[in-house]
Image (cartoon, grey):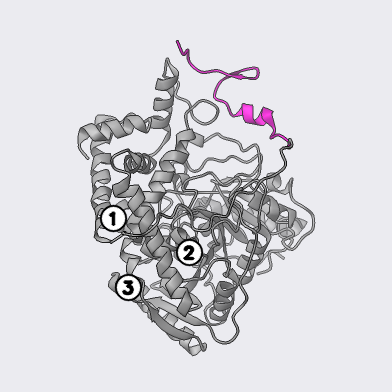
């Protein structure tokens, strides 16, 4: 992965890497990608991909309300709030 | 040692709390220790009445913090309780506190915690393993009767092995993941660590079963039990993996012990063993990059004080809040899911996952259990000189196959070499946990979990 691709991947991942961090992480990223390239050795022709080992069919329930979580505690974890609104920096 | 009533009867309770607080200073197992808070939501009676336990700090317990060992959740207080924990509380068990871990469960030494250093009770210079290292050290140190962990690629079994206790990774879906902070959803399951097979099984029996809060949870559906001597398979390919001499010695001795106990041993082919680590990390990192996208600094968790628009706030909060290993996995996960690279990495890894499942299906057509080491080396020293982060990933070779196939596995203490515990593991078909407990109970009679230095004698 070259420096440009690393920067683009970081942008997609919503991370901002410093110059020093980019160098450090790039070495680790390259090491892993080189290791992943061994996957090419195995013949996967005819194999379906597995997403989950033991997934069952959908289970439906009645469309009725349940006890909501404690909304005050939930809101209490917001970094900044005004009464029952969560505050973020200006959008415009 | 009988732990019943320890957290609830006055005399033993005080002796236990004094001991746990003192040992916490040496071992650093807990990120938060508060048995009084834990006792609030516990039923007075039940099969685990008064039994104190530790909960890995990526599993929610109401009113306790839920940090995931990360700066990004350092001050987060959980508004609800995980189903697995709630069932244990209904059975009378008492949460003693929240245990340390590698950030978001990503690591094999607990050194990736941003919040605390945890030491191995057998040697304070060494790591307790990871990522559920805090729970393993707390159990081996005698601070609690059992500990909950989460096992995504070995995170219950490897620390159990490093600390000389039992560590169960249940069948995927058999224990509800409601309240477990998601890292790699298709791989992970809540598991248990304890000093005895009986305690491990008792805790699992309480936790398991379908839960309306977790759509992927499955009803308990054990297969018919085998009669007569069990056949145990050893993958031929294990011989190709370089093992530390102490691990190799323990592996051979365990095979001998099993033969002496009347088990039949057979070699089974497992040709995908060499590819499990690649497949595992591609899938785990892809799922991690999606699951950790929720940390945006808006509704909860760390928010940077320096940002003048929402986009900059999210990027800076994530950049300042996550540690190196988490960033590495998010970056790689994002990369393998990018259009143009998906087929080469993510899709290929999922197909290899199918091949791994087939290897297990073939093996279990011939044998009842599979035996493997847990980890190729004994507990290593802190600081990365004996094992760097890349070597630690390669060393997941024996543990992560069970996660890819969704199968149960139980790590058991199998030896003590040069003063350090070494574990082995059995793997079984889905829902055949009973077979794991039965075989480990036989071995426990010959080699029980050794007591680490300073292990308490009791609280009566």
The answer for how far apart the CA atoms under marks 1 and 2 are is 20 Å
Q: Secondary structure at mark 2?
A: helix
The subunit carrying tag 2 is B
Q: Secondary structure at mark 1?
A: loop
Q: Classify A67 as above or below B395.
A: above
Q: Write the start and end of the magenta stretch as one range.
A: A66-92
Which label's residue is closer to the chain start, 1 or 2? 2
Label 1, on which residue? B385
Hey, which quadrant is residue B459 in on the image?
Answer: bottom right
Confirm or deny contact between disc 3 and disc 1 (CB under 8 A): no
Quadrant where the image shows the C terminus of chain B: bottom right
Label 3, on which residue? B237
The subunit carrying tag 3 is B
Q: Is disc 1 surrounded by few (<14), some (14 to 19) or many (20+) residues within 10 Å?
A: few
Observer-nearest of A52 and B445: A52
| Residue B201 can be seen, yes or no | yes
Q: Residue at x 58, y 52 (%)?
A: A57
Residue B350 image point, x, y percent: 38, 54
The answer for how far apart the CA atoms under marks 3 and 2 are is 26 Å
Observer-nearest of B153 and B346: B346
Which label's residue is closer to the chain start, 3 or 1? 3
Residue B388 image point, x, y percent: 30, 53
Label 2, on which residue? B163
Q: Is residue A15 left or right of residue B37?
A: left
Q: Residue at x 38, y 40 (%)?
A: B330
């Amino acid at each position: 992965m070259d420096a440009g691709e690393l920067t683009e991947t970081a942008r997609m991942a919503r991370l901002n890497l410093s110059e020093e961090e980019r160098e450090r992480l790039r070495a680790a990223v390259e090491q892993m990608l080189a290791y992943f390239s061994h996957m090419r050795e195995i013949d996967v022709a005819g194999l379906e991909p597995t997403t989950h080992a033991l997934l069952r069919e959908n289970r439906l329930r009645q469309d009725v309300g349940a006890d909501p979580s404690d909304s005050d505690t939930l809101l209490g974890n917001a970094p900044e709030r005004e009464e029952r609104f969560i505050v973020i920096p200006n959008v415009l | 040692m009988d732990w019943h009533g320890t957290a609830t009867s006055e005399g033993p309770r005080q002796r236990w709390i004094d001991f746990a607080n003192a040992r916490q200073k040496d071992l650093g197992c807990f990120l938060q220790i508060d048995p009084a808070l834990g006792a609030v939501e516990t039923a007075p009676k039940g099969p685990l009445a008064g039994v104190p336990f530790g909960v890995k700090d990526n599993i929610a317990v109401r009113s306790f913090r839920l940090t995931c060992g990360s700066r990004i959740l350092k001050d987060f207080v959980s508004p609800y309780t995980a189903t697995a924990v709630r069932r244990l509380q209904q059975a009378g068990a008492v949460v003693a506190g929240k245990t340390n871990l590698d950030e978001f469960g990503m690591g094999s030494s607990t050194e990736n915690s941003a919040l605390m250093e945890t030491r191995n009770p057998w040697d304070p210079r060494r790591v307790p393993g990871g990522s559920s290292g805090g729970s393993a050290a707390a159990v081996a140190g005698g601070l609690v009767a059992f500990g909950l962990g989460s096992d995504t690629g070995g995170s219950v079994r490897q620390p159990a092995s490093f600390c000389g206790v039992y560590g169960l990774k249940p069948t995927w879906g058999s224990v509800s993941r409601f309240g477990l902070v998601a890292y790699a959803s298709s791989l992970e399951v809540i598991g248990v660590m304890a000093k005895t097979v009986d305690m491990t099984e008792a805790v699992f029996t309480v936790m398991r079963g379908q839960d309306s809060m977790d759509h992927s949870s499955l009803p308990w559906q054990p297969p018919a039990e085998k009669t007569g001597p069990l056949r145990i398979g050893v993958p031929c390919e294990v011989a190709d993996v370089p093992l530390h001499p102490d691990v190799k010695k323990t592996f051979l001795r365990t095979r001998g012990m099993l033969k002496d106990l009347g088990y039949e041993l057979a070699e089974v082919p497992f040709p995908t063993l060499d590819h499990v680590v690649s497949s595992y990390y591609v899938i785990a990192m892809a799922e991690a990059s999606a699951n950790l996208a929720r940390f945006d600094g808006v509704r909860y968790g760390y928010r940077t004080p320096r940002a003048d628009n929402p986009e900059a706030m999210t990027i800076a909060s994530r950049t300042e809040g996550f540690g190196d290993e988490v960033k590495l996995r998010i970056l790689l996960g994002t990369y393998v899911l990018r259009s143009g690279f998906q087929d080469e990495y993510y899709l290929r890894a999922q197909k290899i996952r199918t091949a791994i499942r087939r290897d297990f299906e073939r093996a279990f057509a011939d044998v009842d259990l599979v035996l493997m080491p847990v980890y190729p080396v004994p507990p290593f020293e802190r600081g990365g000189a004996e094992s760097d982060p890349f070597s630690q990933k390669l060393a997941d070779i024996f543990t992560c196959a069970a996660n890819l196939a969704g199968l149960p596995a139980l790590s058991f203490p199998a030896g003590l070499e040069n003063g350090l515990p070494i574990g082995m593991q059995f793997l079984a078909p889905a829902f055949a946990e009973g077979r794991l407990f039965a075989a480990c109970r036989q071995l426990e009679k010959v080699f029980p979990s050794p007591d680490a230095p300073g292990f308490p004698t009791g609280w009566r």
